[in-house]
Image: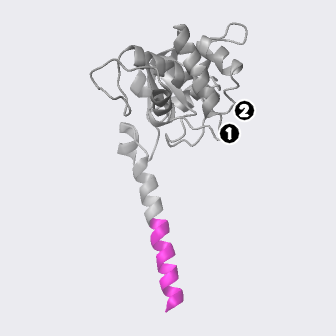
């Protein structure tokens, strides 16, 4: 009896997984009519690092995969792929986002800045230079996301956007250690270079860059 129950459970799990997988695949009109599955391809235009890019992508393609696999901008890293580590952070239309959690088609006509668009080894962005100066990285895997997030953080503060640790939501936020740590809390550094990262951001904030 026990063997039959185990077989039935396995069959049920397999059938359930197959049904869920089939339901998750979007179908084109022709595919729905014919009863076969096929990806829906959409054409979109993005301004990435100041350059217009036209892509034809499966509508399920994340912005992260579009940047890495289709535009070959591999500076943006795929970490957890669940929006929990911040390694894939980019700046989209002036706001930092986890590119693994958003579809590329949602940004049609938008502007995206990746780590490659902030600066180059020959001409670094002030934030990149500060990270180097203060040893704001060790293995470096999270660094592109950390830097993109840090640049956006200072813009948020300049724009008066409060955070969870802002004492007065109506007052202009200050560049304090508590503010920086709270605003950067979505970017995980598994090497633990947090104090150096905070120092780098504070230096750039003090310079007005």
Q: Relative to the observer, which residue lies in front, 128 or 74?
A: 128
Q: How far apart are the alpha carbons under marks 1 and 2?
A: 6 Å
Q: Quadrant of the C terminus?
A: top right
Instruction: Magenta stretch: give its range.
Output: 1-15
Query: Relative to 137, is 115 above or below?
Result: above
Residue tagged by mark 1? Answer: 191
Q: Residue at x 65, y 17 (%)?
A: 130
Q: Residue at x 42, y 27 (%)?
A: 105
Total marks shown come to: 2
Q: Residue at x 37, y 29 (%)?
A: 163
Disc 1 packing (10 Å; few <14; some 14–19; many ≥20): few
Chief secondary structure of the magenta portion: helix
Residue 83 drawn at (x, y percent): 49, 39
Residue tagged by mark 2? Answer: 138
Residue 204 drawn at (x, y percent): 57, 14
Residue 67, quarter of the rendered image = top right
Residue 132, quarter of the rendered image = top right
Query: Relative to 20, is 161 above or below?
Result: above
Q: Residue at x 44, y 32 (%)?
A: 103
Membership of 9 in magenta stretch: yes
Check contact, mark 1 vs mark 2: CB within 8 A.
yes
Of labels 1 and 2, earlier in sequence is 2
């Amino acid at each position: 009896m026990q063997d039959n129950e185990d077989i039935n459970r396995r069959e049920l799990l397999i059938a359930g997984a197959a049904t869920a997988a089939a339901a998750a695949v979007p179908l084109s009109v022709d595919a729905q009519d014919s009863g076969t599955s096929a990806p829906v391809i959409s054409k979109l235009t993005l301004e990435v690092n100041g350059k217009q890019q036209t892509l034809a992508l499966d509508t399920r393609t994340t912005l992260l995969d579009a940047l890495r696999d289709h535009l070959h901008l591999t500076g943006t890293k795929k970490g957890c792929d669940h929006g929990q580590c911040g390694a894939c952070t980019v700046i989209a239309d002036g706001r930092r986002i986890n590119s693994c959690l958003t579809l590329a088609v949602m940004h049609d006509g938008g502007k995206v800045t990746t780590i490659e668009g902030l600066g180059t080894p020959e001409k670094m962005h002030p934030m990149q230079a500060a990270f180097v100066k203060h040893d704001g990285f060790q293995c470096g895997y999270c660094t592109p996301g950390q830097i993109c997030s840090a640049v956006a953080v200072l813009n948020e503060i300049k724009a008066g956007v409060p955070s969870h640790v802002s004492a007065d939501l109506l007052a202009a936020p200050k560049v304090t250690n508590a503010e920086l740590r709270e605003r950067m809390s979505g970017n995980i550094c598994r090497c633990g270079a947090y104090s150096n990262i905070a120092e780098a951001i504070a230096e750039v904030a003090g310079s007005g860059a």
